[in-house]
Image (spheres, rainbow, N blue to C red):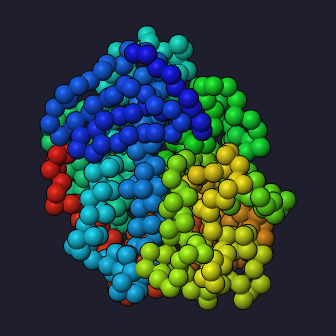
């Protein structure tokens, strides 16, 4: 298989034809090779992996799929899931997210969005399984054990990550679980239907995949150092570069911390969160960096990313949701706006916290409307900072450690590692457990705006009320997305 590959931020220009979802990846060049993967019926055309580059291309293809608007390029970060958490004002009956904000999952437009999430996730999982089905038999095509372990470790980590978010959406939370069936865990490249498993069974399978990924990636921790956003792109093959944008070792550990917290295993959540914290590979932004404008205006705080994705059309989505062009007038039905008073309340401006960079730097006015500017993509922005969507942050590891610490004093200590970095005062270590939990909740609201994590916080903790929701109490009818009626090809 002849290949000419140009890579930037660890993405390749491979084209994968997938039925029923056709995805073409065009970034910098083109490739005439096709990989036909049809999990719903039969594999009509399969060009077997015959060299190392073929596996790299297939893995790059997975990252491109999960970065699509149907998943982490929109729905599962800044869009649909944050609408469910009532992060934006969608109360106008003409707003594109009006029915989603009311949890009307039977609405045609909402059901279509849910179906896109479901089908896109399982399509990506099918591609992952295609890689994993072949990789051990083809181990000899890899130029080193490190490259073999990296490809396989990333694939396993991605499979666990996608199933984990599927069950966080389509299954009950462990705190309310009745043991009912949730989703299928597809760990084979197969056309057969898979039984739907309980939340406990799904999380155990996720853990197994994450742990195997961890074992494969652990021998090479040096390759997963944080990248320098003012550094060079390096060589022509960046497969082992820019590891923050990939399922790196610390991403796996961070996601294990998130998984253990979700299922209620506090000791393991604490252990894994601290491994990421203690790695020394991630740090908070300095004040000078936060004040930088122009080329290195780092609005996503990229030094803090444990795992992020590069979303090639992020500017289109950000402009649609969070910016008004000079030609736009009047209608806000496609915008994700927040009332200024709410923003000030979330960031506790009245308490003197207006210097918090999550407020001061990330909320801007566009044509007189206050908008969230975290994902603005200006022309002068460095290519090293463009298109980044955070998936796991260093701050989350501190929040998990705070929530799972064995005593309140230790917990406050973890929160107080983050608060000065956000230019807000430290908390006294004399606060009680209830106040502590509320402070952690407030940090989730501030930290993860447009990143899709707040909804899962509410769900994980069994909250009966979501702030600003018109529905109360919130129950599993709102927390659990219905499996799409059109779901046929993946079983269950």
Quick one: which residue is furthest to the front in this view? 327
What residue sits 52% from the left and 50% below the top? Answer: 311
| 124, above or below 303, in the image | above
Residue 272 visible here: no
Give the quadrant of the N terminus: top left
The quadrant where residue 48 appears? top left
What residue sits 63% from the left and 59% below the top? Answer: 377
| Number of numbered labels in the structure image | 0
**Would you say 47 lies left or right of 232 here?**
left
**Would you say 388 lies left or right of 26 here?**
right
How far across and down, in percent of the image, does residue 231 sit? 76, 38
- Foreground of the two, 275 or 156: 156
The quadrant where residue 159 appears? top left
What residue sits 51% from the left and 53% below the top? Answer: 313
| 442, above or below 133, in the image | below
| 49, above or below 89, in the image | above
| 49, above or below 70, in the image | above
Quick one: which residue is furthest to the top in this view? 140
What residue sits 57% from the left and 86% below the top? Answer: 339
The quadrant where residue 125 appears? top left
- Foreground of the two, 205 or 435: 205
**Would you say 365 lies left or right of 39 here?**
right
- Foreground of the two, 191 or 293: 293
How far across and down, in percent of the image, does residue 206 sit? 38, 44
How far across and down, in percent of the image, does residue 372 sit? 60, 72
Residue 347 visible here: yes
- Foreground of the two, 394 or 339: 339
Quick one: which residue is furthest to the right in this view? 288
How far across and down, in percent of the image, does residue 19 sit? 24, 40
């Amino acid at each position: 298989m002849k290949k000419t590959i140009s890579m930037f931020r660890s993405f390749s220009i491979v084209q994968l034809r997938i039925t029923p979802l056709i995805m073409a990846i065009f970034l910098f060049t083109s490739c005439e090779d096709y990989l036909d993967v049809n999990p719903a019926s039969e594999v009509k055309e399969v060009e077997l992996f015959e060299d190392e580059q073929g596996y790299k291309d297939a893995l790059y293809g997975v990252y491109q799929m999960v970065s699509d608007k149907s998943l982490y390029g929109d729905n599962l970060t800044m869009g649909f899931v944050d609408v469910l958490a009532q992060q934006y004002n969608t109360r106008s009956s003409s707003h594109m997210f009006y029915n989603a904000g009311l949890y009307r999952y039977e609405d045609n437009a909402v059901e279509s969005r849910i179906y896109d999430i479901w089908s896109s996730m399982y399509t990506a999982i099918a591609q992952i399984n295609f890689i994993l089905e072949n990789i051990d038999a083809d181990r000899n095509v890899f130029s080193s054990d490190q490259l073999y372990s990296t490809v396989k470790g990333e694939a396993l980590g991605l499979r666990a990550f996608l199933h984990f978010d599927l069950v966080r959406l389509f299954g009950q939370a462990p705190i309310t679980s009745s043991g009912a069936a949730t989703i299928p865990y597809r760990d084979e490249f197969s056309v057969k239907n898979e039984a739907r498993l309980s939340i406990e069974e799904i999380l155990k399978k996720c853990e197994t995949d994450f742990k195997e990924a961890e074992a494969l990636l652990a021998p090479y921790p040096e390759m997963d150092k944080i990248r320098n956003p003012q550094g060079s792109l390096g060589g022509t093959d960046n497969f082992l570069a820019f590891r923050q944008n990939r399922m790196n070792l610390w991403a796996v550990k961070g996601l294990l911390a998130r998984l253990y917290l979700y299922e209620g295993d506090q000791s393991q959540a604490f252990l894994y969160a601290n491994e990421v914290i203690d790695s020394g590979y991630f740090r908070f932004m300095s004040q000078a960096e936060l004040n930088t404008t122009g080329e290195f205006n780092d609005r996503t705080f990229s030094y803090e990313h444990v795992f992020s994705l590069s979303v090639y059309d992020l500017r289109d989505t950000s402009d649609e949701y969070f910016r008004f062009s000079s030609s736009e007038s009047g209608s806000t039905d496609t915008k994700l706006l927040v009332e200024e008073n709410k923003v000030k309340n979330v960031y506790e401006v009245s308490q003197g916290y207006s210097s918090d960079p999550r407020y001061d730097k990330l909320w801007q006015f566009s044509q007189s409307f206050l908008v969230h500017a975290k994902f603005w993509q200006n022309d002068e922005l460095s290519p090293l900072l463009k298109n980044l969507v955070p998936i796991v942050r260093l701050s989350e590891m501190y929040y998990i450690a705070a929530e799972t610490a064995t005593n309140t004093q230790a917990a406050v200590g973890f929160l107080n590692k983050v608060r000065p970095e956000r230019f807000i005062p430290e908390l006294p270590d004399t606060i009680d457990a209830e106040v502590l939990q509320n402070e952690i909740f407030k940090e989730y609201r501030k930290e993860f705006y447009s990143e899709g994590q707040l909804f899962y916080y509410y769900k994980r903790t069994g909250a009966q009320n979501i702030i600003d929701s018109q529905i109360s109490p919130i129950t599993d009818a709102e927390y659990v997305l219905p499996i799409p009626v059109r779901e046929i090809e993946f079983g269950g």
